[in-house]
Amino acid sequence: MGDPVPLRTPRLFLTVPGPDDVDAIFDACQDPLIQKYTTVPSPYTRDDAETFVGLVADWWDSGAEHVWAMRAGDELVGMVGLHRIKDGAAELGYWTAPAGRGQGYTTEAARAVVEFAFGPMRLERLEWHAVVGNTASARVAQKLGFQLEGTRRMGLAHHGAGGSHGRTDGWIAGLLSSDPRTESAWGL
Ligand SMILES: CC(C)(COP(=O)(O)OP(=O)(O)OC[C@H]1O[C@@H](n2cnc3c(N)ncnc32)[C@H](O)[C@@H]1OP(=O)(O)O)[C@@H](O)C(=O)NCCC(=O)NCCS
């Protein structure tokens, strides 16, 4: 359905992750916070990274999901994506490798993805979901203009300690194409 669309920000280049990124993705996804707060497999193997880059190409092709690697020069600092693209809506997701955190990269990359979603893609609503307590992720979404809409009890599938699986409470926030892209109070 579509070719990957590269995006540029002041400091980052966002492009489709490929086979050359497998090592960096594998390394980053060993991070306990990425395993705890995202849906990546846990434990995370090199095969998982290889499978992921193959899937991303298919997803771009089908239009089901759009995933970009965030690159600062030659370094892959993280991943940002639009997931479950359907009926004018999608879910925004991101992770940043531990070494790249705290420099505003995620907010900068996600802002470009939001502009793309509401611009060329003409989506009407973006959703953000996070495990309750993931304040770093919440701060990014808040800065983008998302408004907190509530807590979904046991609303998320979740990796527990030691690779166990279960459900956990999840925050949900939304951003409409007509909303201001400025921070509002979340009262957390
Ligand atoms: C969430 C995550 C992507 C944030 O990445 P980042 O690149 O550090 O984010 P930014 O540098 O853009 O920071 C954005 C804001 O979050 C704040 N922030 C970063 N880490 C924080 C933390 N641990 N606690 C509270 N706020 C935090 C920053 O201070 C900044 O706010 P400010 O501008 O008011 O200072 C990163 O911590 C991560 O990959 N976590 C694990 C995976 C994950 O949780 N993904 C999201 C799943 S919903």
Image: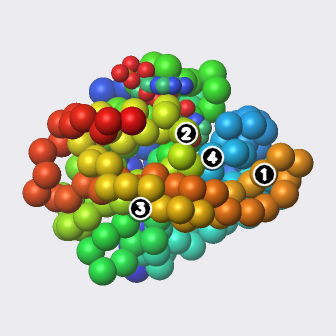
* Residue behind mark 3: 91
Q: Establish whether ligand 1 lies closer than 8 Å to the Cβ of label 1.
A: no
Cα gap from disc 3 to disc 2, whole angstroms: 19 Å
Of callouts 1 and 3, which one flags the residue occurring earlier in the amino acid sequence? Answer: 3
Cα gap from disc 1 to disc 4, whole angstroms: 10 Å
Cα gap from disc 1 to disc 3, whole angstroms: 23 Å
Of callouts 3 and 2, which one flags the residue occurring earlier in the amino acid sequence? Answer: 3
What is the x, y in percent for residue 180?
12, 45
Of callouts 3 and 4, which one flags the residue occurring earlier in the amino acid sequence? Answer: 4
What is the x, y in percent for residue 7?
34, 46
Residue at 36% across, 59% down: 127
**Three-letter code for the amino acid on which mark 1 is drawn:** Gly
Residue at 78% across, 51% down: 160
* Residue behind mark 4: 37
User: Horizontally, is 66 left or right of 124 in the view?
Assistant: right
What is the x, y in percent for residue 18?
62, 53
Residue at 62% across, 32% down: 97
Q: Residues within 10 Å of mark 3 (few under 14, many from 20)?
A: some
Q: Are marks 2 and 4 in contact (CB under 8 Å)?
A: no
